[in-house]
Amino acid sequence: MTIPDLIWEIILGLFVVATLSQLYYYWVYYVRTAWFKTKTGFQVQPPVSVVICAKNEALKLHKNIPLFFQQDYPQYQVVVVNDCSVDESSDILEEFQKTYHNLHVVDLNEDDIKAHDKKLALTLGIKGAKYEHLLLTDADCVPADSKWIATMARNFNDENEIVIAYGPYKNTGGLLNKIIRFDAFFIALQYLSFALARKTYMGVGRNLAYTKTVFFRNKGFASQYHIQSGDDDLFINKVSTPTNTVVELAPQSFTYSDPKTSLSAWIKQKRRHLTTAKHYKPIHQYRLGYWNLSQYLFYVCFVSLLFGSVDYRIVLAIFGIRFVTQIIILRKAMKQMKETDLFFLFLVFEILLLILYPIIYIGNSFVKKHKWK
C-alpha cells in the first residue's frame, strides 16, 4: 500500500468513526424526543405565577399580555417586571391592571438600581411572585393554547421541580425564517432528548417552569451574575438533577416567539446565546463538543473521499445510512414539534448552520458584549 492509499484509508476510517458517532446520538438520544409520548389529563393544578421580564417592549406587551389572561386555569397570576423601560410600557401595564386583577407589576428604575442584566430583573420578579410554582416566558412570546399553564403545571409533583418545554419561533415565511426555526428546532431536539435521558443541560427562558424552592435553595443566579446571558440555560445546567427535571412536549405547552427578520440581527442574538456554552459542566461541554466535531468530521471526510481513491459506492453507502437515519428521526421529531415544513430541506439547513456557526464563534472574539436590551 502506497502512502497516498494509506492516507485515504485513514480518512475513510475517520469517516466511519464520525458516522458511527452521529448514529449513536440519533439512536440513543434524539430518538427519545421523536417518539416521546405526551401525558393526558390535568390532574395536578397548583397555583402558578407566570413571570415575564420586559425592557422597552410596549408594543409587544400591548399585543401579547392579554393572551396570558385567556388561560383556562383555576388559580394563577401574571408578574411583569418592567425593567427600566423608557417607552410607554408603564402606561400600558397600568391600564392592564385595571382590567386584569391578577396582574402584578414590578417596576425597576435606573435611579434606584445600578446597571444590570436580565438576571436581576428576573430575580426581583421571582421574589415578587405570589406562588411557589413559576412559569417563565418572554414579552415577545405567546402561548400556543389556552391550556398552556395547565399543560406545563401538570408535571409538578414532590420530585419534579423543573419542567422544560419547546419554544418555537413563528413561521413567517422565507429562507432566513426557516434557518432560524431549524436552528431552534435542532437545539430543542438536543436539550429535550438529553433531558429525557436524565442528562439535562439546559432549558430556554421562552418556555420554562420551576419552583421558587429550587431557585432560592441554589441561591438563584448568584454564581452567574458575571456572565452576560444564562438566566435560563446556565441556571438549569446548575440546578438540574437526574430526578428533579421533566419534559413536556404536548403542542398545548408551546410558546411562540417573534423571529429575527434580518441575518445580522439573528447573528447578534446567536452571539449572545453562545457566550454561555463554555460555562456548562465539563461533561455537557464534552457531549455537545463531540457531537459538533463528529458533524464537521463527517462532512469534511465525505467531500474529501469523493475525490480520493476509495470506491465512491462505499462512501455513498455510509453517507446513505446516516441520511436514512436522519429521515426517520427528524421527520418524526418535526411532526412531534409541529415543524414539518422544515423537513424537505433539513440537509441544506444543517450544512448552512455548519458554515455560519464558526463565523458567529469567531465574531464573538471581536464584538463587544451587549447588556440585556
Image: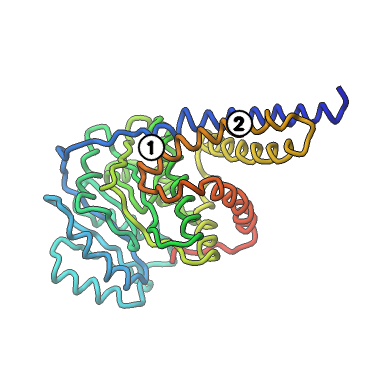
Question: Which residue shows up at 51% across the image and 46% down it?
Answer: 346
Residue 14 in which image quadrant: top right
Q: Are marks 1 and 2 in contact (CB under 8 Å)?
A: no
Q: SS at mark 1? A: loop
- 88 sits left or right of 21 in the view: left
- Where is residue 39 drawn, in percent x and y? 24, 35
The percent coordinates of residue 281 (x first, y second) are 50, 38
Residue linked to disc 2: 19
Q: Which residue is mark 1?
A: 240
Q: Quadrant of residue 238?
A: top left
120 left or right, relative to 76: right
x and y percentages locating residue 173 in the rendered image: 43, 62
C-alpha gap between disc 1 and disc 2: 31 Å
Please give the name of the residue rendered at 48% of the width and 37% of the height, measured from the top-left corner: 327
**Is 343 placed left or right of 42 in the picture?**
right
**Circle 2 residues within 10 Å: few <14, some 14–19, many ≥20:** many
